[in-house]
Amino acid sequence: MGLLSVPCRAGRAEGPEVCSERTSNTAIARWIVQLGSNDFWKREQASQQLGHIGEAAVPQLRAALKSPDLEVRYRARDVLHDIHQRLYSQRLALEGHGDVVVSVAVSPDGRYVLSGSNDGTIRLWDLESGKQVRQLHGRHGSIWAVAFAPDGKHALAGGQASGVVLYDLSTGEQVRSFGPHPDAVRAVVFTPDGRRALSACFDGALRLWEVETGKLLREFTGHKDSIICVACSPDGRHALTGGLDNGHRVRLWDLDNGRELRRFGGHDERIMSAAFSPDGRLAVSSGWDATVRLWDVQTGKEVRCLRGHQTHVYCAVFSPSGKYIISGDEHGELFVWDTASGEHLETFEPGHKGHINALALTSRGRRLVSCGGDRTVRIWLAPE
């Protein structure tokens, strides 16, 4: 599958392929060849047809960027840009927070968004309408971390108040707390089965909790400074952490025995985010060195370094298919990368006025959620 399916539009150019989602690769190849026709109107017709075909034409249009025919290259570039602008577009801006929005999460069924802010509130939003469903209040201070439980009925929140709280989203009531922690909590995540949860603390420790009882199961030590991010592997066996350590390394942990398995070295500045690929074989991290890095989880080796951002990269996530990586930076730019090649495919249309703090994708990948320094949560169309 390519990027994101776009419904065909009625075209003005004549031809049997105008509005067919089943357009064959042969037909697409014919239209691409026609981009270089000596007849101006045939070139125009080919551009229109390929634009109407949309996603299905993207792989061959990318290949056409290397065509020896200059006209084919230029027109393929323009058509790709038009398609990408339709694919990577903002749908909603959710307003209501009174301060910077630090964290976001999407419910397992893709219907709701949870956001945590420096204004001390946690807000539940309807993803399709953008309407606020419920407002939850943290204990005290900023909310820096939120996470949906796999059942979609509960959520974790942590932050400046040195604790983590489990909420019942149907009532907004606090179910139990985990801690106290000796310092602020910057990141939280559930294991895939929902039975355990992880919290990353500014004291440099990662903690594993039993959700049902609130019991501390294990404490992972090794970081010499604050932990900023944590991710749990798809099989629930491992965790990734990163933060402010001088070594600037992502660490891989075994959740069952508490051992640090390996470190991924390459970043030159603090690490702001880490995430597993959907199959658990790769990891992606981002940091203040303006890079996004791809890692082999089994070996700890860097697969490639993605360069293009001009400033601190606060967040990076895999698309649900694992084919794409999306990253957000301090200037409010969202980049889309090809996981296999490391190619920068596209930049989302402008949205946030300031840094992007966190990203989350719906499980089917059709919506991307971002939050940032402009106090908003934004919903985008995104690649699968």
Image (spheres, rainbow, N blue to C red):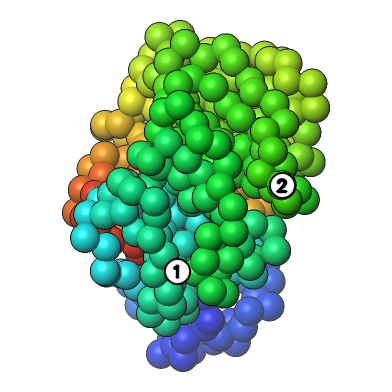
Is residue 185 or residue 79 the one in the foreground? Answer: 185
Give residue 284's position: percent from left, percent from top.
Answer: 55, 33
Q: Is 47 positioned to the left or the right of 164 in the image?
A: left
Q: Which mark is residue 124?
A: 1
The N terminus lies in which quarter of the figure? Answer: bottom right
Amino acid on which the number 1 mark rests in the picture:
Leu
Is residue 345 or residue 78 the one in the foreground? Answer: 345
Q: Is residue 88 visible?
A: no
Residue found 63% across the figure and 20% down from its top = 220
Q: CA distance from mark 1 to mark 2?
A: 25 Å
Q: Is residue 205 visible?
A: yes
Q: Determine which quarter of the picture holds residue 226.
A: top left
How busy is the neighbourhood of tag 1: few (under 14 within 10 Å), some, or many (20 plus)? many
Up/down of 47 relative to 105, above or below? below
Residue found 55% across the figure and 69% down from its top = 169
Residue found 51% across the figure and 44% down from its top = 164
Q: Is 301 positioned to the left or the right of 347 in the image?
A: right
The local secondary structure at tag 2 comes to loop
Give residue 242's position: percent from left, percent from top.
Answer: 50, 24
Up/down of 274 relative to 336, above or below? above
Q: How many marks?
A: 2
Give residue 119's position: percent from left, percent from top.
Answer: 26, 54
User: Which tag, 1 or 2, sits closer to the chain's start?
Assistant: 1
> Which residue is under mark 2?
213
Residue found 79% across the figure and 41% down from its top = 235
The local secondary structure at tag 1 comes to strand
Q: Determine which quarter of the picture holds residue 363.
A: bottom right
Up/down of 93 relative to 262, above or below? below
Of badges 1 and 2, nearer the viewer stands: 2
The C terminus lies in which quarter of the figure? Answer: bottom right
How busy is the neighbourhood of tag 2: few (under 14 within 10 Å), some, or many (20 plus)? few
Amino acid on which the number 2 mark rests in the picture:
Thr
